[in-house]
Image (spheres, rainbow, N blue to C red):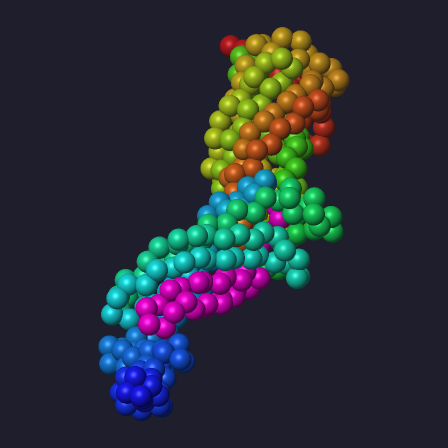
Amino acid sequence: MAEEGYKERGFFGSDKPGKEEADEEKGNGGFFSKVKHFVKDTIGFGKPTADVSGFHILHISLEKVDIVVDVLVTNPNPIPIPLVDIIYLIESDGRKLISGTIPDAGTVHAHGSETIKIPICLIYKDIKDTYDDIQPGEIIPYRVSVELLIDVPIIGRISLPLEKKGEIPVPYKPDVDLDKIEFDRLSLEETTASLHLKVENKNKFDLGVNTLEYSFTLGDDNIANATLSESTKIGQCGEGILEVPITFRPKDLGSAVWDIVRGRGAGYSMKGKLEVDTPFGPMNIPFSKEGGKATFQKKGKDRGLDESDFQDEE
């Protein structure tokens, strides 16, 4: 009987479960919930905050644009918190341009702030192959969405969604061609002239030309290699003229100079690079032209070259 009484009364002499047993039956939820709130309130744990503090175009070319998104994360807690994952997405008019995940993105110091840099590379060919209505030269809207997954002690894992909107370009290569060659002084020994290069901006944004590097060949002879620093603004979908001074010896050109004198012109080619400013950052734009024909004209006169323009050598 004593044995049966022990079983009925339980270890503490009662047939009702004790508080500890009740907590166990509830998965310790009540007890740990109180501890969690006690630690949170006493020690001062709180939810981190985040904000997109910057959107930078580091490098832009005709092939791609390199972007860095700055996310400022503030940790109000007394211990460091790890960033588990960063999930990002860039869209344009609701269409995905690129997405990805950056795992183990670092740690935010206790009672501190950290700027997390998210590098993103947009390849223009991929965009144009996917969306054929996005044409070179356009400016397209973007929306960048970032989700930070953070493990906060006591609180647990939380998600911080962020968003930023703006515009990015899809650059079109400007067309560079020879408009004309004007001479100031013409002799077989030395000729001073100016190349007039026409630059056609096919973009829907302005280009500020800062530097021109070029190589110019007339006939089979290279007559000019130089770097010109000239500040010229070419408006969106507009044209501009770059005037490039050159000095050369016509007698070194062989038959090319006589073809020009006779009005037949001479074949030319050129190649080089433009360094330009855009509203989105600087760009280096290579150019080349082959197969054209060049003629000379006297500066200030609308006519071609003839033998009377040659100055006698003393």
Q: Taking 77 as reference, is 246 left or right?
A: right
Where is residue 313 drawn, in percent x and y?
Answer: 54, 11
Q: Work out whether 21 lies above or below 222.
A: below
Q: Residue 303: which quarter of the image?
A: top right
Q: Nearer the viewer, residue 80 or 241?
A: 80
Residue 45 magenta-drawn?
no
Where is residue 184 drawn, in percent x and y?
Answer: 57, 27
Q: Nearer the viewer, residue 186 or 137?
A: 137
Give the position of the N terminus as an image quadrant.
bottom left
What span is colored magenta in the figure?
Answer: 143-171
Q: Taking 226 as reference, is 252 left or right?
A: right
Where is residue 301 drawn, in percent x and y?
Answer: 68, 32
Residue visible at 50% across and 53% down in the picture:
101
Q: Residue 306: which quarter of the image?
A: top right
The tally of labels here is 0
Q: Nearer the viewer, residue 277 or 300?
A: 277
Q: Work out whether 139 lies above or below 165.
A: above
Where is residue 160 drawn, in percent x and y?
Answer: 45, 68
Residue lying furthest front? 1
Q: Residue 178: which quarter of the image?
A: top right
Q: Is residue 34 visible?
A: no
Q: Work out whether 267 lies above or below 23.
A: above
Residue visible at 62% across and 18% down in the picture:
218
Residue visible at 59% across and 14% down in the picture:
221
Q: Is residue 123 visible?
A: yes
Magenta span: chief secondary structure: strand
